Image (cartoon, coloured by chain):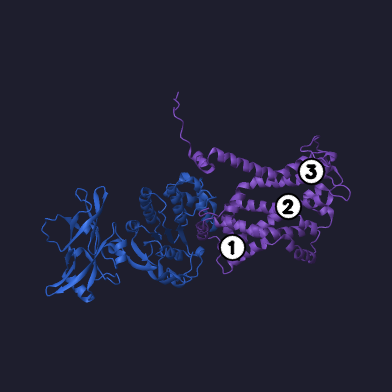
Chain colours: A blue, B purple
Amino acid sequence: MASISLRNVEKRYGDVVALSGCSLEIADHEFVVLVGPSGSGKTTLLRIIAGLEHLTAGELYFDQGLVNDVDVADRDIAMVFQNYGLYPHMSVYDNMAFGLRRRGLAAEEIDKHVRRTAKMLNIEALLSRRPRQLSGGQRQRVALGRAIVRDPAVFLLDEPLSNLDAHLRVQMRAEILKVHRAVTATAVYVTHDQVEALTMGDRIVVMNEGRIHQVGTPGELYDAPVDKFVASFIGTPAMGFVTCRIRRSANGIELFTNAGRIDVSPQQEHILERAGADSVIVGVRPESLAVVAETTELTSDATLRGTVEAVELLGAEQYVHVTTDGGHLTVRVARSHRIIVDEAVTLTAATRDLHLFDQQTGAALR
Amino acid sequence: MEARPRSAPAPSATRREHRAFFGSRPENIVRTVAILLALVWSLAPVYWMAATSLKTELEAASLSPTLWPHHATFANYLGLWGGSLPFASFFANTLFTCLATAVIAVLIATPAAYALSRARFRLRASIGYGMLIFRMLPLVVLLAPLYLLLLHARLLDSSAGLIVGFTTFGLPFAVWMLKSFIDAVPIEIEEAARIDGYPRWQILLRVVAPLILPGLTTTGTFVFMEAWNNLIYPLTFVTTLEKQTLPAALVLTFTGQFKTDWGGMMAAATVTTLPLMIAFFAVQRSMVRGLTSGAVAGA
């Protein structure tokens, strides 16, 4: 078991900066998920932790020991690759035993470890098979087995579920968490799927363009995103944004667009005063918005009018995509709610559910 | 009993693809004729060689040649092994030098190809292309420098000298061919082995080599065939007749000042060709794969 510490890690490929100023503390036994879009640098960061890539600048510590120049073989890590990386010419048993043999363990000891791990992952019946004789889910289990059989200090997983179908992915998520609880190794998990990140991580690291944007628990990321990128990346459907002008009067501050107006709380008023800008981006999560009838008396803090662009039916609920002056919003409503495409609708929200972002930098205003 | 479906079954996907590629009947006929012409053109000398080897001395030397042997005989073949020529030695010399060349070339080429495929160093591309350029040089260009090298190393007129010469010429292609096989091995498999604690040379030996086994045999066979076909090196580097290889012996022993033993020469040529044909048919599938791998994305 080990804690991991990254301090100002930078990675360059010639003139291309893949990672810059990445600092992160991962506690012993923690399950941390690196999440971000393609090209965000999450896999590069994982490979640096593994020792498969050398960092250009910065420091990497395992349990307070600097490992910048420690070879991958000596880092006591195990890794599960996106495309499994199983040895095609070896049986499942040999795939799992290969690393143990290198450590010089006796044959009986190896056999004991392999069979115990195989039992844990329910792959005992597959031990004599070759990887090409296995389904995607079975290969994934074997890859997991190969990683945990060595009882590593750090367990690295690079998008391990991305090749599986949606149903199996949900099943394997639970499986991986079960395995993590059983082996209690420190785990770093890379995914581009924010649902996977939210459901699996003790803490989540949101990355984009080689930078760490925010580190926090799933709840923290969802409720208090530090910038517009995190706010839009975390949550399904994504948070909607509307650019509003700020009107200052003797009665205080009011936000408005051509399609509506938003009252702000005293605290938000204070934040906007401090920011001193003429306009601001307001973010609203789909579940914080409501569609109201035109005839309803509007008493809400925020009221915006727009036109329905599309409706997505998802069984019990539906997502309504609305275009308003200043931005695009998505609303989550019950299936029973009758919504017609191209129809004008009025959306309302409570002030406490609004997120304010700086229009220039995208940073959250707090 | 199950009733047979009345309507004709829909053509299978393979058949549809076949039709899409080969087109309609008239087009088919044109294509077949073209292929047959090409086959006749290229196989005619081979047929002539095999037919002449079965002719009597008189028929083979006749001024009005016969298309097929009128009095077929195996005398020419029997004469190879039982005659005054050390044909068995020629065969053994060729087999030994070519096999040794194939093994040595593959042993040297494998780590070289691995380095070219996986290592990232400044002159990687230049070294790779440099090898290809070397390969494009005509054999004759290398003849004089190789002769001098072998002379100074006291390897002239020896199997070792021939093996050095053959390997020199076969190695660049072997490296490129093996590189294409190694390129096709997913890097994650090697990274998994690195994480499992194995050093590079063991990864090459225990992970990469088993995965490119078809490539190793194909490359070995290719080098073997090239060495087997080499005429100019044995003629230049070997002076003792008993130490000659088959192609050189064909030239040196069957043609005389007053008479050429066409039947014997063609029998020897047929025997010389047979191991090559066997080797080619044994590895033809992977050889084509080796020559074309990397040509399309994902190959």
Q: Is residue B87 left or right of residue A140?
A: right
Check the picture and name the quadrant holding the N terminus of chain A.
bottom left
- Give the residue at mark 2: B229
Marks 3 and 1, the one that precedes in the sequence: 1
CA gap, disc 1 and disc 2: 28 Å
Q: Is residue A212 shown above or below A78?
A: below
Q: Is residue A255 left or right of residue B63?
A: left
Query: Alpha-carbon neighbours of circle 1 within 10 Å: few (<14), some, or many (≥20)?
Result: many
User: Residue placed at 60% from the left, 49% from the top?
Assistant: B286
Q: Are marks 3 and 1 on the same chain?
A: yes
Q: Position of residue A324 (x, y in %)?
A: 22, 61
- Give the residue at mark 1: B116
Q: Position of residue A46 (x, y in %)?
A: 43, 63
Q: Position of residue A302 (x, y in %)?
A: 17, 63
Query: Alpha-carbon neighbours of circle 2 within 10 Å: few (<14), some, or many (≥20)?
Result: some
Query: Alpha-carbon neighbours of circle 3 within 10 Å: few (<14), some, or many (≥20)?
Result: many
Marks 1 and 2, the one that precedes in the sequence: 1
Amino acid type, mark 1: Leu
User: Callout 1: residue from which chain?
Assistant: B
Q: Position of residue A67 (x, y in %)?
A: 47, 69
Amino acid type, mark 2: Asn
CA gap, disc 3 and disc 2: 16 Å
Q: Secondary structure at mark 3?
A: helix
> Front-most of B79 and A316?
B79
Q: Is residue A327 visible?
A: yes
